[in-house]
């Protein structure tokens, strides 16, 4: 049995509708393109001003961040979104200008988000925390998105008046959230849509690992802060002695009023040289701050001042170990990070051990 034929008039009408739709779309795209080219310089300036303002605020409030970047949507991206969202006008888009803040840990995302709320006029009804959209058994894209205006106080400035009523988007995320977004979302690695269950499972596992790592970095940062506070409090209360010897505890010990009259130079807890000498001290058997006190005896400091007119804190500790037990230092603690011996140090050790011991037995055996 033959299927009923579609009337020619209906076919013609359908073709006309498709043609009219295409023409309407083309007309709309042309209008969007014209308005975009007119307004792009304004949105580009808006993005730069908002990013510069936010960067300055983050620094002034001591919020650690990796980067604050800004961009203006391309024409292709604008047309795609206007078409997909069926916007009637370009003004319905809220993210032509965009700013992205990348922090190291989640607690700084919170602090940065609070600054966004105080710095700009936030449209809370259009802003979203993407992590809240994930159910408790799902992992994936996590970032905080704000739709903002500069706000009345800033718009009152004559140079910012052209930006009145214009919106921009601020995204705040951690480094690991950014990595996931770049791979899964922004870089279009075809991870969206329907994937085979085996691949989707691996993708979810990866997202879960990144989320777990993000949380662990935040927890570690918190624990380091708490350790720092504890050591500083111990230094203030005079109970620093039993603290484990670390760069921080050593720094706090030196700041607590120890008198090293000939030590010069700035002591930095982050210096690799300091890390080296702490390693040597531990190999020498000094595991706590109180062990440092036992090295810096009155006899040593007096001899040091007689023979060495000027030295560093690190140099003082190394000479203290040599003065205490030169043979043990060279056999257990010396990591060969330094070579040679100054005449001043040689004089110090000769007074302590005698010329023969200093010159012959230990120094020649270690070939410094």
Image (cartoon, rainbow, N blue to C red):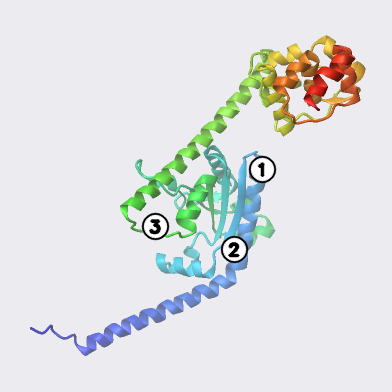
Q: How many marks?
A: 3
User: Which residue is the extreme one toward the left?
Assistant: 1
Q: Nearer the viewer, mark 2 or mark 3?
A: 3
Where is the N terminus found, in terms of image quarters? bottom left
Q: Secondary structure at mark 1?
A: helix
Is residue 351 toward the left or the right of residue 170 in the image?
right
Assess whether mark 3 and mark 1 are in contact (beta carbons under 8 angstroms): no
Answer above or below: position of 74 versus 186.
Answer: below
The residue located at (77%, 28%) in the rendering is 267
Looking at the image, is 276 positioned above or below residue 237? below
**Mark nearer the N terminus (1 vs 3):** 1
Residue 41: image x %, image y %?
A: 62, 67
Q: On the image, numbered disc 3 is attached to which residue?
A: 192
- Picture coordinates of residue 265, whole percent (x, y): 83, 30
Q: Residue at left 88%, top 12%? A: 354
Mark 1 lies on residue: 59
Position of residue 312 in the picture relative to residue 4 (left or right) = right
Discs 1/2, front: 1
Q: Earlier in the sequence, mark 2 or mark 3?
A: 2
From the image, tell me which residue sits under label 2.
Answer: 43
Residue 149 position by quadrant: bottom right
Local crowd at mark 1 within 10 Å, few (<14), some, or many (≥20)? few
Of badges 1 and 3, nearer the viewer stands: 3
In the rendered structure, which disc, 1 or 2, sits on the residue that comes first in sequence? 2
The answer to which quarter of the image holds residue 245 is top right
SS for callout 3: loop
Q: Give me the C-alpha separation between circle 1 and circle 2.
A: 24 Å
Residue 182, percent from left and from top: 50, 54
Q: Residue at x 36, y 58 (%)?
A: 193
């Amino acid at each position: 049995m033959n299927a009923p034929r579609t009337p020619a008039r209906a076919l013609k009408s359908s073709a006309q509708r498709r043609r009219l739709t295409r023409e309407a779309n083309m007309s709309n795209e042309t209008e969007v393109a014209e308005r975009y080219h007119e307004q792009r310089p304004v949105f580009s300036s808006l993005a730069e001003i908002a990013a510069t303002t936010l960067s300055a605020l983050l620094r002034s409030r001591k919020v650690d961040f990796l980067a604050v970047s800004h961009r203006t949507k391309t024409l292709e991206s604008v047309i795609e979104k206007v078409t997909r969202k069926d916007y009637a006008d370009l003004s319905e888009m809220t993210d032509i200008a965009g700013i992205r803040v990348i922090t190291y840990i989640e607690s700084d995302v919170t602090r940065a988000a609070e600054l966004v709320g105080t710095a700009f006029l936030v449209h809370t009804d259009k802003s979203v925390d993407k992590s809240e959209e994930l159910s408790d058994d799902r992992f994936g894209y996590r970032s905080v998105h704000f739709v903002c205006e500069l706000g009345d106080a800033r718009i009152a400035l004559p140079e910012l008046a052209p930006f009145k009523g214009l919106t921009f988007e601020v995204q705040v995320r951690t480094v690991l959230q950014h990595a996931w977004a770049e791979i899964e979302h922004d870089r279009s690695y075809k991870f969206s849509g329907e994937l085979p269950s085996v691949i989707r499972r691996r993708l979810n596992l990866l997202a879960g690992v990144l989320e777990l790592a993000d949380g662990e970095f935040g927890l570690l940062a918190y624990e380091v802060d708490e350790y720092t506070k504890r050591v500083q409090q111990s230094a203030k209360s005079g109970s620093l002695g039993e603290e484990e010897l670390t760069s921080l505890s050593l720094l706090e010990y030196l700041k607590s009023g120890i008198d090293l009259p000939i030590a010069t130079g700035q002591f930095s807890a982050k210096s690799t040289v300091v890390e080296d000498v702490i390693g040597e001290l531990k190999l020498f058997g000094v595991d706590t701050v109180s062990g440092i006190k036992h090295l810096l005896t009155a006899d040593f400091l007096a001899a040091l001042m007689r023979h060495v007119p000027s030295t560093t804190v690190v140099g003082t500790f190394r000479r203290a170990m040599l003065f205490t037990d030169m043979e043990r230092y060279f056999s257990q603690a010396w990591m060969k990070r330094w070579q040679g011996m100054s005449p001043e140090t040689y004089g110090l050790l000769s007074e302590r051990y005698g010329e023969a011991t200093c010159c012959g037995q230990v120094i020649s055996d270690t070939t410094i």
